[in-house]
Image (cartoon, helix red, strand yellow):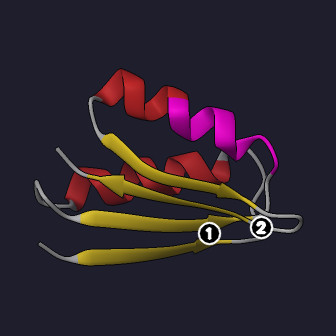
Amino acid sequence: MAEIILNCKGLQCPGPIMQVFKTAKEAQAGDVILVKVTDRGFAKDIQAWCKKTGNTLLELNEGETEISAKILKK
């Protein structure tokens, strides 16, 4: 199991979710993807994406200036 870190700060929708999609496509089952973004819409996007794809949203933290998400690749 690998941990993959994505820095998507400064990218606007749909940039961050597209980066997650691309990374998840190349990741192995059991890998953890840690994403950091500044796009406020990402929280809803990542929840919907995980539900649609079957990947597990392990953690979602919404700070004042940054959102971070931890996803387990299925």
The residue singled out by tag 1 in the image is 36
- Residue placed farthest to the top in the image? 52
Q: Which of marks 2 and 1 precedes in the sequence?
A: 1
Mark 1–mark 2 distance (CA, rounded to whole Å): 7 Å
Q: Residue at x 53, y 34 (%)?
A: 47
Q: Quadrant of the C terminus?
A: top left
| Residue 7 locus on image (x, y percent) | 59, 76
Q: Residue at x 13, y 58 (%)?
A: 30
Q: Amino acid at mark 2?
A: Glu
Whether the residues at callouts 1 and 2 have beta carbons within 8 Å, the answer is yes
What are the residue bounds of the magenta stretch?
40-47
- Left or right? Give the position of 20 relative to 43: left
- Quarter assignment of residue 34: bottom left
Q: Quadrant of the N terminus?
A: bottom left
| Residue 11 locus on image (x, y percent) | 74, 62
Which mark is drawn over residue 66? 2
Q: Residue at x 79, y 69 (%)?
A: 10
Does the magenta segment cover residue 43?
A: yes
Regarding mark 1 in the picture, which secondary structure is present there?
strand
Q: In this view of the protein, which residue sits in the foreground, 35 or 27?
A: 35
Does the magenta segment cover residue 52?
A: no
